Image (spheres, grey):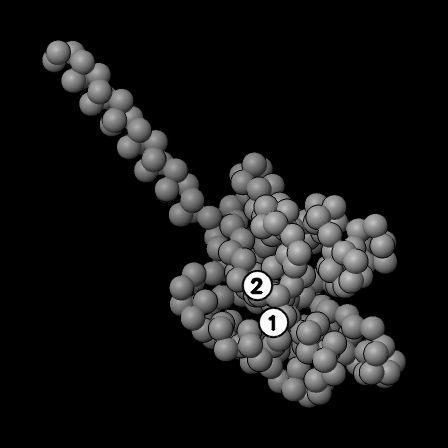
Amino acid sequence: MQNLKKSVFLVLALLITLANGSVQANSTKSQILVLGDSLSAGYGLNTNDTWVNILNTKWLNEAVPFQLINASISGETTDAGLARLPQLLKQHSPKYVLIELGANDGLRGFSLKLIKQNLTKLINTVKNTGSQPILFAMKVPPNYGKRYSDRFNQLFYTLGAEFKIPVVPFFIEPVVLNKDLMLADQLHPNAQAQPIIANGLHSQLMPLLNHKSE
C-alpha cells in the first residue's frame, strides 16, 4: 500500500513538473496582438481555418518564440479599433501590434484625412505603451474614383515612412484575384486561401520580428 501511494505521488509530481514547464514555455513567447477586421477575423470561416490560427500552429511546431493574439472583428473600422485598443494593450501587454485596419473605412468612403488621423492615433497609442506597431497596407477598388483609391492605397506607406515603422504590403494580394480562393462575395478569402496567406505573412513577418528582437 505504501509503495502504491509512493508511486501515485511520484506520478503526480511528474505531471505537475511537466505542467509547470509547459506554462513557463508559453510565458516565454512574445505576444503579438492582431488588431484587424474580417480579413483577420476569418469572415465565413471556422476559427481553426483562419490564417492567424494556421500561423500560430506553424510557429508552435517550429518553436518560433511568438504567439498571435487575435483581437480582430468583422466590420471593424479605424475608429472602432482605436476605441478598443487601450484595453487590449492593457490586457495582453504585446511586444508587437499588427494594425490591419482601414479597408472598411475605404469601402465606406470615409475621408482620407479621418483615416490617416485614426491610423496615426493607433500607431501612437501602440508606441506610447512600449509596444511596436507593424502596419498592414490595405487596398480598395476605385468605387469612389481612381484618385481616392490611389491616395488611400498610398496612405499606409506614407505613414510607415513618417513613423519609421514596418509596412506589410497588401497581405491578401496573392489570392484576391483568384476567384477559386475567394468567398462568393469576392471580398473575403476562403478556407483554401488561408494557408497561402499564412505562409506569405510568415515570410514577411519573420525578418521584421527577428530584426527587432535582437
Quarter of the image that includes the N terminus: top left
Whole-percent x and y of residue 71? 53, 62
Snapshot quadrant of residue 16 = top left
Name the kind of residue labelled 1 in the image.
Glu
At 73% from the left and 69% from the top, the residue drawn is 138
Residue lying at the far right of the rendered structure: 146
Left or right of 68, for residue 24: left
Callout 1: SS: loop
At 74% from the left and 83% from the top, the residue drawn is 109
Q: Nearer the viewer, residue 133 or 147?
A: 147
Whole-percent x and y of residue 173? 79, 59
Residue annotated with mark 2: 72
Snapshot quadrant of residue 97 = bottom right
Q: Is residue 186 above or below residue 46?
A: below
Name the kind of residue labelled 2 in the image.
Ser
Residue annotated with mark 1: 76
Whole-percent x and y of residue 128? 47, 75
Q: Are marks 1 and 2 in contact (CB under 8 Å)?
A: yes
Q: Nearer the viewer, residue 196 or 187?
A: 187
Callout 2: SS: loop
Snapshot quadrant of residue 177 = bottom right
Q: Is residue 113 visible?
A: yes
Left or right of 43, for residue 181: right
- Structural crowding at the residue carrying mark 2, measured as other residues with C-alpha within 10 Å and reported as few (<14), some (14–19) or many (≥20): many
- Structural crowding at the residue carrying mark 1, measured as other residues with C-alpha within 10 Å and reported as few (<14), some (14–19) or many (≥20): many
Q: Is residue 155 visible?
A: no
Question: Residue 203 shows which numbered tag?
Answer: none
